[in-house]
C-alpha cells in the first residue's frame, strides 16, 4: 500500500463520532481532529502516529453530549414543517427594525430543550 493511502486510512475523520458524541461538550475536538489529520498529511507514517494517538485520547476523554445534534434535528424538522420562512426578511438589526425574525408561532421556540 502506498504511503498516501496509509496516511489517509490512519487519519480518516470519523464525523459521526465527533459530531454526535463530543459536539458542543468540547468545541476544540474538531480542531484537534483536523490538526492530527494535517500532521499525518505533512509528516507521514510512522512519524504522525503520536499525533493520531494524542487525538484519539483527547476525543476519548472529551465530555460527551448529543445536545447540538438533537437541536439540529429539531430545527430541520421545524423548517420542513413551516413553509414561508424568510418572507418579508429585513436586514436591519432586530432592535432597530422591531421585527421578529422567526415565522409566526415560532418566536419562542427553543431547540435545545
Image: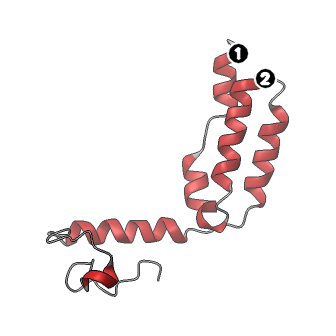
The answer to which of marks 1 and 2 sits earlier in the sequence is: 1
Is 4 on the left-hand or right-hand side of 16?
Answer: right
Pointer 1 with pointer 2, Cβ within 8 A = yes
Residue 81, quarter of picture: bottom left
Residue 93, quarter of picture: bottom left
Give the secondary structure at mark 2.
Answer: loop
Residue 67 percent across, percent down from the top left:
54, 72
Give neighbour class at mark 2: few <14, some 14-19, many 20+ (Cα, 10 Å): some
Considering only vertical position in the picture, is 58 above or below 104?
A: above
Image mark for residue 70: none
Tag 2 residue = 45
Is 8 on the left-hand or right-hand side of 107?
Answer: right
Residue at the (66%, 49%) spot, across then down: 31
Furthest residue in direction top, as rendered = 2
Q: Which quadrant is home to the N terminus?
A: top right
Tag 1 residue = 3
Residue at the (63%, 51%) spot, across then down: 30
The total of numbered circles placed on residues is 2
Considering only vertical position in the picture, is 103 above or below 20?
A: below
Furthest residue in direction front, as rendered = 96
Residue 92 percent across, percent down from the top left:
28, 73
Residue at the (75%, 56%) spot, across then down: 60
Give neighbour class at mark 1: few <14, some 14-19, many 20+ (Cα, 10 Å): few
Amino acid at each position: 500500500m502506498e504511503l498516501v493511502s496509509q496516511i489517509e486510512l490512519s487519519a480518516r475523520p470519523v464525523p459521526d463520532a465527533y459530531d454526535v458524541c463530543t459536539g458542543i461538550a468540547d468545541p476544540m475536538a474538531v480542531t484537534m481532529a483536523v490538526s492530527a489529520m494535517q500532521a499525518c498529511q505533512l509528516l507521514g507514517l510512522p512519524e504522525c502516529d503520536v499525533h493520531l494517538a494524542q487525538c484519539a485520547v483527547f476525543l476519548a476523554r472529551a465530555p460527551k453530549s448529543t445536545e447540538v445534534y438533537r437541536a439540529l434535528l429539531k430545527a430541520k424538522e421545524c423548517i420542513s414543517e413551516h413553509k414561508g420562512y424568510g418572507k418579508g426578511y429585513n436586514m436591519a438589526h432586530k432592535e432597530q427594525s422591531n421585527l421578529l425574525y422567526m415565522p409566526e408561532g415560532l418566536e419562542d421556540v427553543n431547540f435545545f430543550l
